[in-house]
Image (cartoon, helix red, strand yellow):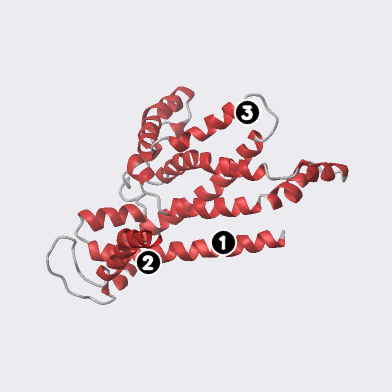
Amino acid sequence: MTIPAVVLFAAFHTFPVLKGIYYSFTNWDGLSLDYKFVGLRNYLNLIGDKNVWNSYIFTFKFALVSTILVNIISLLLAMGLNTKIKFKNFFRAVYFLPNVLSILIVGFIFNYIFAYVIPALGTKLGIELLKSNILGNQKFAWIGVVIVAVWQASALNTILYLSGLQTVPEELYEAASLDGANKFQEFWNVTFPVIAPFFTINMVLAMKNFLMVFDHVMSLTSGGPGRATESISLLIYRSGFAGGEFAYQSANSVIYFMFIIIISVFQIKFLQKREMDM
């Protein structure tokens, strides 16, 4: 079973990646029958490309803010769902529901809410900030994308944190209570050190997923207004497959792939070191 699995993985994963790296050193537009090698020209041109810089700035800003928010909200929700409350299983199912919904469907629903429901509410309440569609505002559209992405991503992260909270021995809380620890000290000195591995997993997965954001942007803004919310994945897809820049965007993909690897390795190393210090 091992050899067929390796062959399939190489055929559908490794080979396309190597092929993409190969094309990044050419001028192929994705359709022509001939092309020629251009060396590092695609990589050097990326440095001066304003659209590439804009997409990197938006993507990293979006990923950083979303990762922080989704982990704070998920941890708070998990702690609430881990207490002795009525209808606990019902609430757990409700909070997990966004994770099973299609991102495109969620995007279209929120698009309607941002376009019609919130402006109508803002007009009725006389709140100027809410009177217009935030997704149509070049300055604040990225916040709308963050809201939807965090709302949906919190579901899975909440379940992961909930799993971690159930591994905390009850005896530790009893010992902390006898020592006179308040709720915050109990969380910081007992709960958080025990669930630190879950925190690491959630931080790494959330950052990686948000860095590759595509569906949320596509369904909410299509990268607009202008190019204000154009993520790197969307730029690569559009320009690479429809814009005749296949080789150029292949070079962009290679650079971005390396960025994601470096960030993920850094996160794992830093957070695992923190786990040991705790």
Q: Which mark is residue 255?
A: 2
Percent from the top left, x then y, of residue 172?
A: 79, 46
Indicate the amino acid at tag 3. Answer: Lys
Name the secondary structure under disc 3.
Answer: helix
Cβ atoms at labels 1 and 3 below 8 Å apart = no
The answer to whether 59 appears left or right of 190 in the picture is left
Q: Residue at x 31, y 58 (%)?
A: 12
Give 160 or 252, whichever is nearer the viewer.
Answer: 160
Q: What element carries label 2?
A: helix
What separation in Å lies between label 3 and label 2 (alpha carbons)?
45 Å
Q: Mark 3 points at which residue?
A: 88
Q: Position of residue 1 (x, y in %)?
A: 39, 58
Q: Residue at x 57, y 26 (%)?
A: 90
Q: Which of the labelled discs sits on residue 213, or is there none?
A: none
Q: Position of residue 74 (x, y in %)?
A: 58, 41
Q: Can you identify the residue that label 1 sits on?
A: 268
State the image quarter where residue 109 is shown. top left
